[in-house]
Image (tube, rainbow, N blue to C red):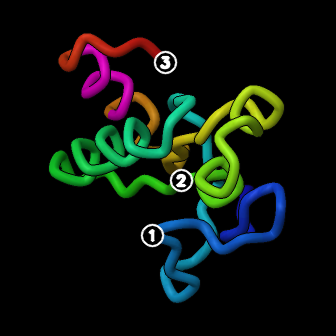
């Protein structure tokens, strides 16, 4: 996932094409966009840039959540281990 777009072609929330295109890993998936935004905010407080995938489709019709695998929170490969540590400290599992 390096294009800055979700599986339906919508621009990812927080994506900045001027930053470059790092290799990404999905750290978590949530059925509701607000849950994904909460994790993204916490990761960014810790200095980890995170992007949301499939948020727009699920916000449009939440019934797509199961079909798409939820709203995904992606981080750069080099931030993956730190992001896991943050999730562990929050009591959240990937």
- Name the spot of residue 73 as percent of width and height, x first: 51, 42
Q: Earlier in the sequence, mark 2 or mark 3?
A: 2
- Name the spot of residue 33 as percent of width and height, x first: 48, 45
- Give the residue furthest to the bottom: 18
Q: Is residue 15 above or below residue 30?
A: below
Residue at x 65%, y 47% (from the top left corner): 58
Count the numbered circles shown.
3
Q: Quadrant of the N terminus?
A: bottom right
Q: Quadrant of residue 93?
A: top left
Residue at x 52%, y 88% (from the top left corner): 18
Q: Which residues are magenta?
A: 83-88
Marks 2 and 1 close (CB-CB < 8 Å): yes
Identify the residue position indicated by label 2 in the image.
52
Q: Please check the rendered image and state whether residue 16 is part of the magenta-colored stretch, yes or no.
A: no
Alpha carbon separation for disc pair 1 and 3: 21 Å
Alpha carbon separation for disc pair 2 and 3: 15 Å
Overall secondary structure of the magenta stretch? helix
- Residue 30 appears left or right of 40: right
- Name the spot of residue 5 as percent of width and height, x first: 72, 68
Identify the residue position indicated by label 1 in the image.
14
Alpha carbon separation for disc pair 2 and 1: 8 Å
Q: Earlier in the sequence, mark 1 or mark 3?
A: 1
Mark 2 or 3: in front is 2
Q: Secondary structure at mark 3?
A: loop
Residue at x 59%, y 41% (from the top left corner): 71
Identify the residue position indicated by label 3 in the image.
94
Q: Earlier in the sequence, mark 2 or mark 1?
A: 1
Residue at x 65%, y 34% (from the top left corner): 70
**Mark 2 surroundings: few (<14), some (14-19) or many (≥20) residues within 10 A:** many
């Amino acid at each position: 996932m390096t294009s800055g777009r979700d599986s339906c072609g919508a621009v990812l929330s927080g994506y900045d094409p001027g930053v470059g295109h790092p290799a990404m890993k999905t750290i978590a998936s949530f059925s509701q966009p607000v849950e994904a935004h909460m994790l993204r905010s916490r990761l960014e407080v810790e200095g980890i840039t995170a992007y949301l995938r499939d948020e727009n489709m699920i916000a449009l019709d939440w019934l797509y959540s199961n079909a798409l695998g939820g709203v995904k929170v992606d981080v750069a490969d080099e931030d993956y281990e730190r992001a896991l540590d943050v999730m562990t400290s929050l009591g959240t599992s990937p």
